[in-house]
Amino acid sequence: MSKEKKQFETEAIRTQLERTEFLEHTSPLYLTSSFVFEDAEDMRASFTEEKERNIYSRFTNPNTSEFVEKVCRMEGAEDGYAFATGMAAIFSTFAALLDSGDHIVSARSVFGSTHTLFTKYLPKWNIETTYFDINKPETIESCITSKTKILYAESPTNPAIDIIDLKLLGNIAKKHNLILIIDNCFATPYIQQPIKYGAHLVVHSATKLMDGQGRVLGGVTVGDADLVREIYLFARNTGPALSPFNAWTLSKSLETLAVRVNKHCENALKVAEFLENHPKVNWVKYPFLKSHPQHEVAKKQMKLGGNIVAFETKGGIEAGRSFLNAIKLCSLSANLGDTRTIVTHPASTTHSKLSEADRLEVSITDGLVRVSVGLEHVDDIIKDLSQALG
Ligand SMILES: Cc1ncc(COP(=O)(O)O)c(C=O)c1O
């Protein structure tokens, strides 16, 4: 793969494997579990890593390497490793870097399974997490102890679309010598590149906008080469690798990331503006609306506002549920970042097991609806939302 740095869109399309004797135009799919050696010496040198080459697809595969290389170029990262899902990326990143007794400081509003990882599973290995309120960043430093190793956040958050100042996090991480990890799934590297602000690692659910077509699951962690090396060794031995087929699909998906995300964001802004003026809506949260509480921070660190719009229906939990029941065109689905617009009502679904007070701590009010705005014609999306609001 060429080393010369090109524009984002060009890297997304032209980062590809060397052509084989067949002179294929796009990279072929290497659906093979292992690779062969020339002789005993080749095998020895490969296993001792004197030679950089593919051995077994749990370690590396040409298709996963191409996908990882593209994400590294997009995020400005040194190295990376691709996983079967976003959660595999997040779990493996923490498991590889932390020891028993280490401590994490994390934003309270993080994706539900990440929160479960922090509260239920990592404590089994004596790893505790202290949470800070994303809307009170001035409290972050008071959460840091001598055992803190990782500072973690998402921006924008799922599902409340809060924004945190990445530069501020980068400065805190530097001052306290912490590893800053950012889940950049909602923004994608097209919109925001956390490494520029001091993040050491960036994690992604590639299942979302990276694939963007609701087809495959995937995850990736990219960042500082020495940290990625630890993560690679953990993953190589524990087996959460991305499949070659999914890597091939995701690499093709990245070719259209910029055009898709541009259009997603254009539609999302129109949907947000429509909702903001609707009498049955209490409030709308979209980073590129002036009314967003962290609009100024969003404008500084994001190129566009993303494709997720959060809003609150008047009438609480029942209003949220009846809104969902009245939807005709959009999908009721657990995914996001698809070409198809998807609506969810977190209080009655993903977060229904939490008490109202606990939901409020992560900015989820009873009437909160999350819209993952798709690529259908925006007039049709708005028409559907409008008739469902009644
Ligand atoms: C912000 C965020 N991070 C991580 C994940 C987990 O990704 P996956 O479903 O690919 O495991 C999700 C899934 O919705 C997410 O929204």
Image: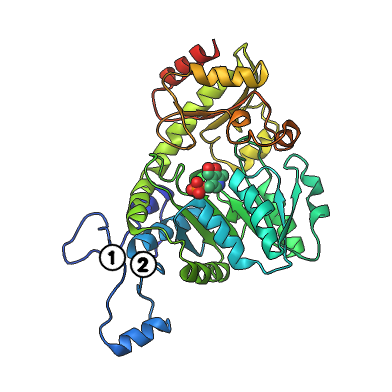
Mark 2: amino acid: Ser
Q: Can residue 198 be seen at all in this image of the molecule?
A: no
Q: Can residue 287 be seen at all in this image of the molecule?
A: yes
Q: Label 2 crowding class (10 Å Cα cut-off): few <14, some 14-19, many 20+?
A: many
User: For numbered disc 2, what is the local secondary structure?
Assistant: loop
Quadrant in which residue 223 is drawn = bottom right
Quadrant in which residue 289 is drawn = top right
Considering only order in the chain, which callout, 2 or 1, is on the residue closer to the N terminus?
1
Q: Which residue is depicted at the point 63% across and 33% down?
A: 352
* Label 1 C-beta lies within 8 Å of the nearest ligand 1 atom: no
Q: Position of residue 21 (x, y in %)?
A: 17, 67
Quadrant in which residue 70 is drawn = bottom left
Residue farthest to the left, as pictured = 22
**Residue hosting label 1:** 32
State how far apart marks 1 and 2 are (Cα): 7 Å
Q: Which residue is depicted at the point 31% across and 85% down?
A: 42
Q: Position of residue 304 (x, y in %)?
A: 53, 36
The quarter of the rendered structure image containing the N terminus is bottom left
Cβ atoms under marks 1 and 2 closer than 8 Å: yes
User: For numbered disc 1, what is the local secondary structure?
Assistant: loop
Q: Which residue is depicted at the point 33% across and 84% down?
A: 43
Q: Label 1 crowding class (10 Å Cα cut-off): few <14, some 14-19, many 20+?
A: few
Q: Position of residue 92 (x, y in %)?
A: 55, 61
In depth, the one of 359 and 363 nearer the eye is: 359
**Residue hosting label 2:** 57
